[in-house]
Image (tube, rainbow, N blue to C red):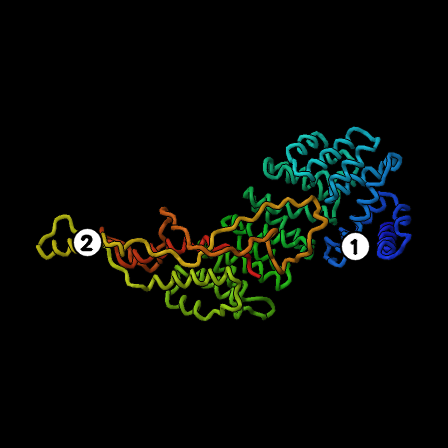
Amino acid sequence: MKGGSVIGGAIALLLLAAGSPSAASAQEALQPYQLVRSLQLIQDRIAGGDHAALPMQAKLLEMIDARMRDANAGDFKEPKNFRALLVYGMSGGNPVTVAAAASRAMTDPQSLAIAKGVVAYLNGRPAEAIETLKPIDPMSVPADIGAFLALVKGSLLAADDPATALRLLDEARLLSPGTLVEEAALRRSVGIAAAQGDAARFALASTQYVASYLYSPYASQFADAFVSGIIALHMAISQDKIADITSMMDPEREKVIYLRIARHAAIDGMTELSAFASAKAELGRNGNGNQDDPRTQLYSGLSTMTSASVDEVRAKLGKIDRGKLSQSDRDLLDAAQAVAGEVVAPVKAAVKADAAPATAAKGEDAKSAAEASADPANADLPPVEGAMPDQPAVASSDPVVAASDPAKDASAVSPPPAPQPAETPAAAPAPTGAAPVVQASAPVATTDAQDPIDAAVTSTRRQLDQIDQLLGAAPK
């Protein structure tokens, strides 16, 4: 009941601050640690999916900032208040306020070092932050700051020392289970494990996140890392495991996750994964299929570009309602239709002349074939119009617990920050080293002659490679 009384007092204080002239005196009556504890309880509710608490969080951060700026050396004689200052800073607080308050505090050198490292972290100086915090073991300090310290250090070391980063994130979860700290630690673990190629760790962290924090306002960031991880680890993680994880989601989130996987996999040429994800997105759950969703039709069509009948693919693409697609997906549809159209376009055979023709007629045939092969019309097929280059996501530099992040659930599944649709210049030339993908039904070459169908499929594959440039915004 103690936690409930603290948060109840914080709520009463928020109501006072909204319209009472005595709000300032009421705010001063609470110690900094009481305000910060209230903030943590609200954040934990947010992590569990209570998005209605977001405005309360914003107001509390504002009040804590004012209280910390007014705090004097006497306030920080109480160790809990200085630890509250550190927690406030590591919760995405104002680094100017943290630095100013720490300069007035009389406390132990280790606590001052943590404050210095936190300020460096918040001000975007990771090298200084790592150097300052490196000797401090999160497990050796009080748990209320140890969890946040482990989260900060784990985030800082994610790129340079991922193994240590994962261990620190585990410590953060151990010290603060069921909180926004654990939510953030799990979310970061998913991305690090995928980057390391650790499929088992990726699957475990994803399962734990979906089981506990699927409705967090930061779940869209998890969704982005999860989809990227599935693409990166597609050879190491089974479709059954993917299905096990997504089965814990609600039907709408599951559908959007599969749509995103299908889109990325189709563009990257992972036809088996794309077909699996497209089928899952179409199937839906509890008999509520999504066969009429134009996105599932598009991604399913892309996944069969090199395996199904060209006429079947063209017919399927032609039935898609363009008006229900995002601009980036309309560009993708245009590219796919252009590729399918080029497959059935007339192709001039490039036939080698025999080295020693037996007759004059064969010699004439060889001459004609050589001239045909030199014809510019036999060059690579024209680039796909409307192709859109990749837009790499800007690296997120959110605070350890991004207190002011807007609420975005996974149903939107927009990356943080989401790549936005760009202008659509003509596609760049296809890579010259693109490996041809020949249909299973294509005849095996038994002579030096190049079969016209092989030539068409090879050129088509070059066009498919250009679809790699069409990674615009995620499905909406």
Give the image quarter of residue 107: top right
Figure check: 62 above or below 96: below
| Residue farthest to the left, as pictured | 360
The percent coordinates of residue 186 (x first, y second) are: 66, 47
Q: CA distance from mark 2 to mark 1?
A: 77 Å
- The residue that disc 1 covers is 56
Tell me the quarter of the image containing the C terminus.
bottom right
| Residue at 85 percent of width and 50 percent of height | 3
Q: Are marks 2 and 1 in contact (CB under 8 Å)?
A: no
Q: Describe residue 341's horizontal placement relative to residue 474 as left or right.
A: left
Residue 371: image tag: 2
| Residue at 41 percent of width and 59 percent of height | 385
Q: Describe residue 365's horizontal placement relative to residue 296 as left or right.
A: left
The percent coordinates of residue 45 (x first, y second) are: 76, 54
The percent coordinates of residue 285 (x first, y second) are: 59, 66
Mark nearer the N terminus (2 vs 1) = 1
Instruction: Report crowding for label 2: few under 14, some 14 to 19, many 20 or more residues within 10 A (C-alpha).
Output: few
Instruction: Report crowding for label 1: few under 14, some 14 to 19, many 20 or more residues within 10 A (C-alpha).
Output: some
Query: In front: 157, or 100?
Result: 100
Q: Describe residue 163's horizontal placement relative to residue 302 as left or right.
A: right
Is residue 130 visible in the rendered structure shown here? yes
| Residue at 69 percent of width and 35 percent of height | 120
* Kind of residue at disc 1: Met
Give the image quarter of residue 116: top right
Give the image quarter of residue 283: bottom right
Secondary structure at numbered mark 2: helix
Query: In front: 418, or 41?
Result: 418
Is residue 264 visible in the rendered structure shown here? no
* Kind of residue at disc 2: Glu
